């Protein structure tokens, strides 16, 4: 049985004092919640603070990684640097990286590979825009994004990774895909992996990301192929994030 994972993507938010208060609240509240893995992905500058202050049960992840291992790449962060800081996970291919910073499917696949070479578990983000959904292209778009990684890394790589389905039209908009809509895409992702390796597909955690909130989490997590959430804005609110974690644990 797949153990649910709830990952908080803080995006470009936070301050030293704010991080201390947020982590302190989560440390206190998560002690009463089990049967769920919890991951925090703060901005790069707060990784060490979170590592040093978060409870041992909280995993640490980064929001992005370079596809390069070292060298003259000003502003980039190598996967080995993230492991030095105690990271276990890293998000790759988030829709904001794809749309705002030009991360192509090929570059996302290269980042996925770099993360795994350093021992990190990549969380591969996939999803469609509103125009693509309205054109009926959701499944083909998502399949192509996954195929880019399968083509270079093979299906076995997904035994040491997670996938996050994030409909681009729902991120930060307050809109959430209906549970049946999200489930259909999650099931298609699992079937795509299963066509190459049923065992890997069975163990793969597929998270939903798209304005997950305390109000929507329970219905989403009740779906058979939704194994937790990649949570954005709600992860910055202690009570909201804890409520989402409780929904995943139940």
Image: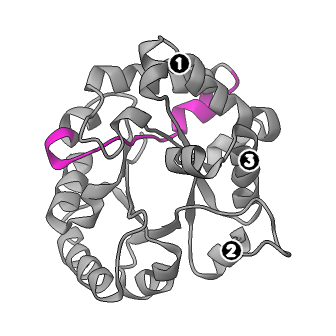
Using the numbered discs, state the Cα–Cα distance from disc 3 to disc 1 in whole angstroms.
21 Å
Between 221 and 141, which is closer to the camera in this rendering? 141
Between 34 and 106, which is closer to the camera in this rendering? 106
Q: Position of residue 120 (x, y in %)?
A: 64, 62
Q: Would you call the spot at circle 1 few (<14 residues within 10 Å), some (14-19), or many (20 or more)?
A: some
Q: Would you call the spot at circle 3 few (<14 residues within 10 Å), some (14-19), or many (20 or more)?
A: some
- What residue is shown at x 36% (from left), y 42% (from top)? 171
Q: Which mark is residue 160?
A: none
3 or 1: tag closer to the N-terminus: 3
Q: Position of residue 247 (x, y in %)?
A: 20, 47
Q: Is 33 placed above or below 246 here?
A: below
1 or 2: tag closer to the N-terminus: 2
- What residue is shown at x 40% (from left), y 19% (from top)? 184
- What residue is shown at x 79% (from left), y 71% (from top)? 73
Quick one: SS at disc 2? loop
In the image, taking residue 18 as reference, residue 218 lies left or right, namely left
Q: Position of residue 221 (x, y in %)?
A: 28, 37
Q: Is 245 placed above or below 183 here?
A: below
Circle 2 sits on which residue?
75
Which residue sits furthest top?
136
Using the numbered discs, state the Cα–Cα distance from disc 1 to disc 2 in whole angstroms.
34 Å
- What residue is shown at x 56% (from left), y 27% (from top)? 142
Using the numbered discs, state the Cα–Cα distance from disc 3 to disc 2 in whole angstroms.
17 Å
Circle 1 sits on which residue?
139
Region rendered in magenta: 196-216
Between 220 and 13, which is closer to the camera in this rendering? 13
In the image, taking residue 89 as reference, residue 2 lies left or right, namely left
Circle 3 sits on which residue?
107
Q: Are marks 3 and 1 in contact (CB under 8 Å)?
A: no
In this rendering, the label closer to the viewer, 1 or 2: 2
């Amino acid at each position: 049985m797949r153990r649910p994972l709830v990952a908080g993507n803080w995006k470009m938010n936070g301050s030293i004092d704010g991080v201390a208060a947020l982590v302190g609240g989560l440390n206190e509240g998560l002690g009463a919640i089990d049967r769920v893995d919890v991951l925090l992905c703060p901005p790069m500058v707060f990784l060490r603070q979170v590592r040093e202050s978060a409870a041992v049960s909280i995993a640490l992840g980064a929001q992005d990684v370079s596809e390069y291992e070292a060298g003259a790449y000003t502003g980039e962060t190598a996967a080995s640097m993230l492991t030095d800081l105690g990271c276990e996970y890293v998000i790759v291919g988030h829709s904001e990286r794809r749309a705002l910073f030009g991360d192509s499917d090929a570059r996302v696949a290269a980042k996925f590979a770099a993360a795994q070479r350093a021992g990190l578990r990549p969380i591969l983000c996939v999803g469609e825009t509103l125009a693509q959904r309205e054109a009926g292209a959701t499944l083909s778009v998502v399949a192509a994004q996954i195929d880019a990684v399968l083509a270079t890394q093979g299906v076995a790589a997904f035994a040491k990774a997670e996938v996050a389905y994030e409909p681009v039209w729902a991120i930060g908009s307050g809109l959430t895909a209906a549970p049946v809509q999200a489930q259909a895409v999650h099931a298609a992702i699992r079937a795509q992996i299963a066509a190459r390796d049923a065992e890997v597909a069975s163990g793969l955690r597929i998270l939903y990301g798209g304005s997950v909130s305390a109000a929507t989490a329970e219905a989403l997590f009740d779906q058979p192929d939704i194994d937790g959430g990649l949570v954005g804005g709600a992860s910055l609110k202690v009570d909201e994030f804890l409520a989402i974690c409780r929904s995943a644990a139940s």
